[in-house]
Image (cartoon, helix red, strand yellow):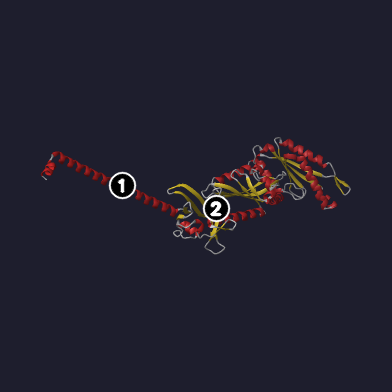
């Protein structure tokens, strides 16, 4: 016993025991530190896992498409609530159920029944499969879905099947409504009595109806792709371009313009051009919608009425109103006193001619004289009938005095040829008066006819 006490009292033994205690303390500290580090790493991994799960659930909740994740064997590992709602099954109740045993009633695009395994199988070209499932409005209601299936080889637990389900019913209905609207528009366009066309931003015809083609003397097929400007009368192109630029720049929503077009046969037609610019939702220009109404007959009628208002109905010569306008314009020009003159013509014995042969013969005589006056005047003036047998010629010429006498001489030469009336040769005569514009007329005097 005393020897054992002596051993413990030895300095070497005490030092060894102290070292052993230090080593044990260090080991305890190390294992404690390592355990704390492992716990911290574990807590960090769990926190990351929770964050990832929250993010994943947030993505799944906010995703526009339903998502199904299945094991390679086909059992459902996860189904989003949206996928369950779209398919009409319980998302939580689908866990562990094979895809082929999901209570999904589906049809293909041709309304033929599909087994769930077929509905969720991947397509050869990787495109979505179109399937229909029962809707909520009765037996006739079908909701159309796009189902895309793909295998992910590097998932966290190995390979997995990812299925996305998108409800395209709204898009399909919108597309069908757009198709119906487009069909109605095209039927209305094809059968419209007025010309209609769709024109691109380069002002090329992309679509025209039959009325438009007939107005242009062409065919629908030949006009597609034709520059619209090539049909326009050259003198009306600038007015059209100005209006188009204002429309494109947003200064107006549409414009109307009456202008001329040259048909395929070379004839000119008048038409009212109505143009509207169709824009995208953001305001960018897309294309033009054009209507074209043939106004050639209306224009000719208006011109005929205007012509009758200013011309003698028997001879076609200018009447007193038009002569007044012509003279007013001529005397307002510079150097009118040396360039403007008039010739007054009064038929001799016209009343006797009427009394002897009748008014029809008198009318023939007036038409005959009108032709002589036109021929004698040529392009140097305007011939007018201002009374029963009274005519006036307004003359404009750089050498007006010579022109007046030349015209007067040509009139006398023309009247030498007798007029044949009922086997009679009637010699017509006329008295002529000549006048030149003077300073009083040019500086404000009113021309008198």
Structural crowding at the residue carrying mark 1, measured as other residues with C-alpha within 10 Å and reported as few (<14), some (14–19) or many (≥20): few
For marks 1 and 2 on the same chain, the one whose residue lies earlier in the sequence: 1
Residue lying at 15% horizontally and 38% vertically, measured from the top left:
12
SS at badge 1 = helix
Q: Nearer the viewer, residue 3 or 137?
A: 3
| Front label number (1 vs 2) | 1
Which residue is the site of mark 2?
A: 129
314 vs 61, left or right, is right
How far apart, in angstroms, are the residues tagged by discs 1 and 2?
A: 48 Å
Residue 33, image x and y in percent? 26, 45
SS at badge 2 = strand
Residue at the left extreme of this rendering: 2
Q: Do we see residue 89 in this rendering?
A: yes
Which residue is the site of mark 1?
A: 38
Structural crowding at the residue carrying mark 2, measured as other residues with C-alpha within 10 Å and reported as few (<14), some (14–19) or many (≥20): some
Residue 176, image x and y in percent? 58, 56
Residue at the right extreme of this rendering: 423
Residue at the bottom extreme of this rendering: 138
Q: Nearer the viewer, residue 374 or 294?
A: 294
């Amino acid at each position: 016993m005393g020897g054992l006490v002596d051993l413990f009292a030895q300095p070497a033994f005490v030092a060894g025991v102290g070292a052993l205690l230090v080593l044990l303390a260090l080991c305890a500290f190390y294992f404690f530190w390592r355990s704390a580090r492992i716990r911290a790493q574990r807590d960090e991994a769990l926190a990351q896992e929770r964050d990832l799960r929250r993010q994943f659930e947030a993505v799944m909740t906010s995703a526009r498409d339903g998502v199904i994740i299945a094991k390679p064997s086909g059992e459902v590992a996860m189904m989003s609530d949206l996928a369950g709602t779209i398919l009409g099954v319980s998302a939580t109740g689908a866990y562990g159920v094979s895809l082929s045993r999901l209570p999904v009633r589906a049809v293909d695009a041709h309304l033929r029944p599909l087994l769930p395994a077929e509905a969720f199988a991947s397509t050869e070209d990787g495109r979505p499969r179109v399937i229909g499932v029962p809707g909520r409005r009765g037996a006739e209601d079908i909701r159309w879905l796009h189902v895309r299936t793909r295998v992910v080889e590097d998932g966290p637990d190995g390979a997995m099947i990812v299925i996305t389900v998108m409800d395209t019913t709204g898009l399909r209905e919108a597309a069908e409504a757009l198709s119906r609207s487009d069909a109605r528009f095209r039927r209305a366009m094809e059968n419209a009595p007025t010309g209609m066309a769709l024109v691109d931003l380069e002002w090329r015809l992309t679509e025209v109806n039959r009325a438009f083609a007939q107005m242009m003397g062409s065919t629908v097929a030949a006009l597609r792709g034709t520059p619209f400007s090539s049909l326009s009368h050259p003198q009306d192109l600038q007015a059209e371009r100005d209006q188009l630029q204002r429309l494109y720049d947003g200064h107006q929503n549409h414009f109307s313009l009456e202008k001329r077009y040259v048909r395929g046969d070379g004839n000119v037609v008048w038409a009212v051009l109505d143009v509207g610019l169709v824009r995208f939702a953001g305001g960018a220009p897309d294309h033009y919608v054009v209507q074209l109404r043939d106004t050639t007959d209306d224009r000719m009628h208006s011109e005929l009425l205007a012509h009758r208002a200013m011309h003698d109905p028997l001879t076609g010569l200018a009447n007193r109103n038009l002569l007044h306008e012509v003279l007013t314009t001529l005397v307002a020009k510079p150097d009118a006193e040396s360039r403007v003159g008039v010739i007054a013509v009064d038929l001799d014995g016209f009343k006797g001619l009427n009394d002897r042969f009748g008014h029809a013969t008198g009318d023939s005589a007036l038409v005959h004289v009108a032709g002589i006056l036109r021929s004698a005047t040529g392009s140097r003036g305007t011939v007018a009938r201002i009374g029963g047998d009274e005519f006036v010629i307004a003359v404009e010429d750089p050498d007006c005095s010579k022109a007046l006498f030349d015209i007067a001489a040509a009139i006398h030469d023309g009247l030498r040829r007798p007029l044949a009336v009922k086997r009679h040769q009637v010699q017509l005569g006329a008295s002529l008066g000549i006048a030149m514009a003077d300073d009083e007329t040019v500086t404000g005097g009113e021309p008198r006819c």
